[in-house]
Amino acid sequence: MMTPQISLDAELVSAGDVTHFWRVPRHHGFDCLRATFRRHAYARHTHETYAIAAILEGCETFFHRGEQHYAGAGSIAIVCPDEVHDGEPYEGGFEYRTFYPSVELMREIAEDVAGRPLSSPPWFRHSVVIDPDLLQALVGLHASLAQGGGWTSELEQDTRLIGFLAKLIARWADLDRLPPMRAEPKGIARARDYIEAHLGEETDLARLADLAGLSRSHFIRAFRRETGFAPHAYLLDRRFRKATHLLEQGQTPVDVAAACGFFDQSHLNRIFKARMGVTPGVFRAA
């Protein structure tokens, strides 16, 4: 586990912010975070994984699916893959335990629960749920995973993990149902594809608007409506996601910054911490 001094800026540490971040390599790999945030605020971003968090003290407020939500002590916050969200302390801060299971793992467990193949991964309609039994199961699971091979065996950890996810999915997930979606205009899809293909380069608004067949002002409004991001914020989000993959492969932060189009390593550090709560170096080490 990592100490807060190498995860956060000194001013955040002095304000009482603490983070411990690590990765469990089994089950397609998933990240775990134990944190207290008094001042740190996440920028809007997306993950390729689910994000499931137990709020132990205080309250976290976060934007999700077009609304502002409040997750108080005793609640569980759930964000599905590719959903735009942020997060920040509300009235004094919060302490939470969160982990990020992959789509593959969640689908495997959902099919075990359903007893049959499913047409899609599980989807959760509620951003915040109140379920005391599940909350305690999540906290216990998180504590066992944090031991890193200490007093809990992998058998116990896996039993807790599968048991928790099975209960979560059985009680709160919609199976064989895709999240509500609209058909994306072809022009916006072309602009998104261009951004994805040129993450390491500077992108011109006029070019994107031309690809979409819209004026620049109309394009900005349409792009935000379809993606939840302004064009420049979408580019940063995709650069962040590419950076996580390269760091997972063992590339150094300085090389990742260059490959993903960040100005320098300090720019990567700012963007990464604002979305993950830890530095690229801590993420890579985990």
Image: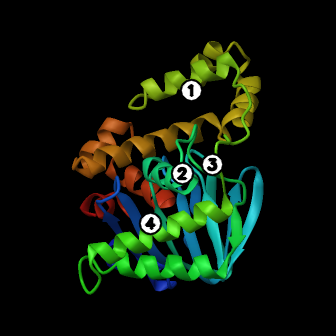
Residue 46 appears at what percent x and percent y? 55, 48
Q: According to the image, what is the colour scheme of the structure?
A: rainbow
- The residue pinned by badge 3 equals 84
Residue 96 relative to residue 202: left or right: right
Question: Of circles 2 and 3, which is in front?
Answer: 2
> Tag 2's secondary structure?
loop
User: Residue at (32%, 79%) from the top-left corner?
Assistant: 3
191, above or below 176, in the image: above
Residue 240 appears at what percent x and percent y? 44, 46
Q: Quick check: marks 2 and 1 in contact, CB under 8 Å?
A: no
Q: How many marks?
A: 4
Question: Of circles 4 and 3, which is in front?
Answer: 4
Counting residues from the N terminus, which is met first, the one under dot 2 or under dot 3? 3
Kindly report the distance in space between the C-alpha atoms of the residues bearing marks 4 and 2: 15 Å
37, above or below 83, in the image: below
Circle 4 Cα neighbour tier, 10 Å, few/some/many (<14 / 14–19 / ≥20): some
- The residue pinned by badge 1 equals 192
Callout 1, which amino acid?
Arg
Question: Is residue 24 among the parts visible in the rendering?
Answer: yes
> Tag 1's secondary structure?
helix
Kindly report the distance in space between the C-alpha atoms of the residues bearing marks 2 and 1: 37 Å
Kindly report the distance in space between the C-alpha atoms of the residues bearing marks 4 and 3: 27 Å
Which mark is on residue 115? 2
21, above or below 203, in the image: below
Which quarter of the figure is the C terminus placed in? bottom left
Callout 4, which amino acid?
Ile
